């Protein structure tokens, strides 16, 4: 139950981001009557710099929820399933590969696919409002405020101002802001001290047999890999908005852009799919490396109380480290130096790897799940309610693209995925009636279960 609750919440966190970022340029008064709750959400995020604040809190939520999924879905030692051979359970269960695919397809890709085109319907519910408030509350606590200091340093080095819709902080606002920055620095330092100490003492959930030194090295390598993947999408978002001749002249910047925009532009969303799988894989391994675990009979880390040790064991400290050092920091660097990021040979290498992952088709099941979700809860494309951007402009409601923050200090990511399902899936549905029949039966089954639940609820009432 906990596992599925976390997956459902993750899908709202991921889909909510796609919706709120995508709706930022749209004048929200045009859907205030048809989507009251969506209007309430965007009224919050469109005010001042709240979208940046939401993205900051949301980034921590994603990582922490993935860490919790890893803890709740990890197999117990010696677990077997359906009498499958040992090597199968080792590959799919013990390594966490099955959980990675489940998280990626159910909790992330399916929701992002739908939310990229059905933004209004996706957040028109109280669950979306609750998730938004949680993200804003996390940011308001100040735990992530060291990221703002990093943003200021990066922007200063780049010689670029951080654009803001709010005036400079003065008086009490400035005191509270810098107080939370200092608090955040202390929290990050404490989290690093606890995690590194546990790694050297072998008191984490890392797989048995892995030496402590290797765990420490793996920790920093994975943090760097996650950082590259997180920064790449920020750099790619920036490069899509500038002219070809301004995208850099270095060998790898040119090769990266050529590959990214090759053909009909399918490599751009293809990268997003492969990147998602890569990042989730890294998150799961980082969760194992950083989550503390004290064996029965062992002394607690630093001799702390059981209550404090249980807090360490939640994985929240690892989530803080990963959010700040492996995610937000790299995104901020990429937002300030997108061309330099593209010129890095590793960017090209990781792009090729992500495209290779996507080409295997291992995540294309997400499109089936997205289709079932869309039909089941009757998600409609935004054009049904508010028309296209061109139609809105004719009606005097032109989108304001300047409302979407970008440049140094902003973590705006690539919008959406494919406009439609992969060609292979569309061809399969067209050529094999049984596949289409199965997809429709899944939709009907879900609808039937919903009707049965409603009927029972009416009887109880």
Image (spheres, rainbow, N blue to C red):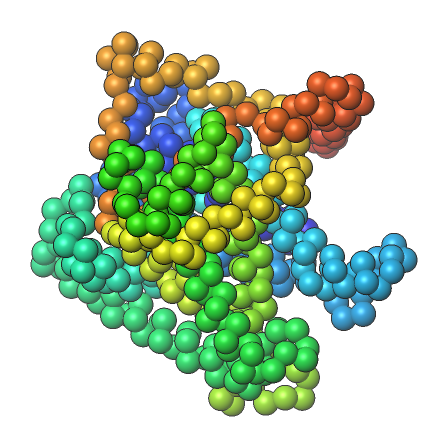
Q: Nearer the viewer, residue 270 or 101?
A: 270
Q: Residue at x 46, y 15 (%)?
A: 384
Q: In this view, does 399 lie above or below 239?
A: above
Residue 119 percent location from the top left of the image: 45, 29
Residue 148 percent location from the top left of the image: 25, 58
Query: Which residue extends farthest top?
Result: 394
Q: In this view, does 136 lie above or below 88?
A: above
Q: Is residue 201 above or below residue 452?
A: below
Count of marks overlaid on the render: 0
Considering the image in quadrants, where does the C terminus appear?
A: top right
Q: Which residue is drawn at 31% across and 74% down?
A: 186
Q: Which of 148 and 2 is in front in this view?
A: 148
Q: In which quarter of the image is residue 95?
A: bottom right
Query: Which residue extends farthest front?
Result: 251
Residue 243 percent location from the top left of the image: 26, 33
Query: Which residue extends farthest right?
Result: 83
Left or right of 436, for residue 324: left
Q: Residue at x 78, y 19 (%)?
A: 433
* Residue 29 seen: yes
Left or right of 447, for residue 148: left
Q: Which residue is drawn at 53% across and 66% down?
A: 286
Residue 260 percent location from the top left of the image: 43, 39
* Residue 305 seen: no
Q: Which of 89 and 309 is in front in this view?
A: 89
Q: Quadrant of residue 27?
A: top left
């Amino acid at each position: 139950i906990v596992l599925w609750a976390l997956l459902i919440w993750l899908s709202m966190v991921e889909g909510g981001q796609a919706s709120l970022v995508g709706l930022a340029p749209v004048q929200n008064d045009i859907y205030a009557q048809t989507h009251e709750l969506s209007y309430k959400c965007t009224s919050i995020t469109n005010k001042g710099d709240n979208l940046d604040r939401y993205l900051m809190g949301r980034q921590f939520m994603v990582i922490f929820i993935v860490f919790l999924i890893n803890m709740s879905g990890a197999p117990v030692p010696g677990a077997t399933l359906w009498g499958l051979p040992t090597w199968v359970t080792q590959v799919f269960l013990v390594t966490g590969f099955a959980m990675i695919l489940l998280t990626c397809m159910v909790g992330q890709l399916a929701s992002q696919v739908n939310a990229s085109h059905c933004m209004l319907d996706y957040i028109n519910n109280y669950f979306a409002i609750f998730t938004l408030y949680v993200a804003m509350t996390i940011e308001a606590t100040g735990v992530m405020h060291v990221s703002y200091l990093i943003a200021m340093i990066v922007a200063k080095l780049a010689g670029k101002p951080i654009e803001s819709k709010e005036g400079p902080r003065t008086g009490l606002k400035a005191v509270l802001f810098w107080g939370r920055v200092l608090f955040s620095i202390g929290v990050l330092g404490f989290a690093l001290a606890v995690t590194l100490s546990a790694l050297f003492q072998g008191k984490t959930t890392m797989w048995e047999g892995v030496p402590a030194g290797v765990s420490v090295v793996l920790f920093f390598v994975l943090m760097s890999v996650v950082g590259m993947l997180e920064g790449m999408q920020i750099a790619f978002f920036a490069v899509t908005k500038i002219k070809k001749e301004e995208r850099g002249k270095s060998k790898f910047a040119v090769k990266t852009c050529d590959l990214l925009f090759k053909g009909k532009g399918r490599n751009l969303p293809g990268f997003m799919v492969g990147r998602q799988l890569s990042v989730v894989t890294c998150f799961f391994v980082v969760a194992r490396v950083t989550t503390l675990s004290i064996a029965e009979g062992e002394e607690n880390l630093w001799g702390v109380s059981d209550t404090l040790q249980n807090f360490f064991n939640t994985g929240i400290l690892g989530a803080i480290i990963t959010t700040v050092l492996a995610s937000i920091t790299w995104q901020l660097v990429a937002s300030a130096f997108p061309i330099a990021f593209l010129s890095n040979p590793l960017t090209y290498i990781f792009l090729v790897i992500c495209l290779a992952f996507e080409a295997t088709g291992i995540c294309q099941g997400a499109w089936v799940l997205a289709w079932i979700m869309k039909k089941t809860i009757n998600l409609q494309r935004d054009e049904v309610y508010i028309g296209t951007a061109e139609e809105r402009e004719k009606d005097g409601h032109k989108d304001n693209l300047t409302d979407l923050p970008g440049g140094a200090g902003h973590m705006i990511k690539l919008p959406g995925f494919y406009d439609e399902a992969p060609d292979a899936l569309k061809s399969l549905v067209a050529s094999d009636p049984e596949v289409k029949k199965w997809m429709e039966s899944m939709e009907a089954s879900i609808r039937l279960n919903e009707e049965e639940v409603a009927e029972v609820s009416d009887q109880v009432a």
